[in-house]
Image (cartoon, rainbow, N blue to C red):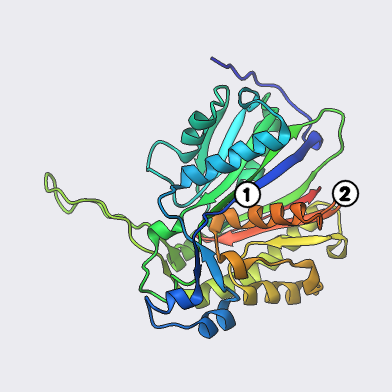
Amino acid sequence: MSVHKTRRIDLAAIKIITSSHYLPKHQVSNDDLSHLMDTSDEWIKTRTGIEHRRISEGENTSDLCTAVAVELLKKSGWSPESIDLIIVATMSPDYYTPATAAIVQGKIKAKQAVAFDLSAACSGFIYSLVVAQSFMGNMNYRRVMIIGGEVLSKVINWHDRTSAVLFGDGAAGVLLENEQDSTSSFLGNHLQTFGDLAASLQAGKTLPLASFPAYSPHNYGAFEMAGRDVYTFATHRVPESIIAAVKKSNLQLNQVDWFIVHQANSRIIKQIAKRLQQPLEKFPMNIAAYGNTSAASVPILLDELIDKKKIERGQILALTGFGGGLTVGTQIIKY
């Protein structure tokens, strides 16, 4: 059994070693959805920027996350036993318990790793990065795996065009390592929660039994979203979060090479760029292909940009998520 001893580690040494993503093979187009509900390809594209999304056929959240984990280990050459911590950010876990991260830990045989899930909806991957820094800075957790994974198709009402057209399934993640003689990768962050707006975006609602010992099965409730409220929240709070994180990093906005923003809606991303007075070219998008994949959104886009060699070592990245809670989070990284 592994015993983790408390020991202070230099936070400046933490770096992203590699990244990976995994998507279900089944692709669902806007035209496909028009057969299920009163919608059209034009209606969806003009309002969201989405054209397709990937939908799982039998693969659960842990399956998607495990595929990412296996690829991360393959690309890094690390042994599973060398991983100290696994965090899975998800709002669509396999079970209430065990945690999806625990299932992944078991499947990849990372026997020394502590594993748990983090629930912060579409901000989950960013929150996980910040939590990982704390573990690596205050304990001897040298190697950490962070995965954002979702099978949102489990909690979608496929006849509600206000929400069903938005979401897709997928997973992606990164490996972090504390390199003792290295320079900083994690420059500054900003997290904020607005619990008074919790009702603006909900999924998986369950209710207690009306009376004991009456029995009633606990069924997940489908997505419910106040679209206008979420749009207003995102277009105001996300720019504020980015500005705050950039300031903490002792940088200026124009020094950020890429703004990797949660892929919720292309109109939201364009408005964020406008409010920050930054070129839209610095805000890459893949929402047309995958839709909103919640906690998987930012790491999927990050890995695609790295694969395409658009992101290079030494560049400054602003990773930003926003969603249920309502939550917002930004992490500034020198990749």
In the displayed orientation, state which residue is furthest to the top. 1
Which residue lies at the image location 44% right of the left edge and 46% below the top edge? 93
Q: Callout 1: helix, strand or loop?
A: strand
Q: Which amino acid, by three-letter code, is at mark 1?
A: His
Image location (x, y in percent) of residue 79: 65, 25
- Residue 27 drawn above or below residue 273: above
Pick the residue in front: 101 or 109.
109
Q: For residue 233, what is the image quadrant?
A: bottom right
Circle 1 Cα neighbour tier, 10 Å, few/some/many (<14 / 14–19 / ≥20): many
Pick the residue in front: 205 or 150.
150
Which residue lies at the image location 52% right of the left edge and 56% below the top edge? 25
Identify the mark at residue 314; answer none if there is no mark. 2
Residue 257 appears left or right of 132: right
Q: Nearer the viewer, mark 1 or mark 2?
A: 1
Residue under numbered circle 1? 21
Q: Which amino acid, by three-letter code, is at mark 2?
A: Gly
Which residue lies at the image location 82% right of the left edge and 28% below the top edge? 180
Q: Callout 2: helix, strand or loop?
A: loop
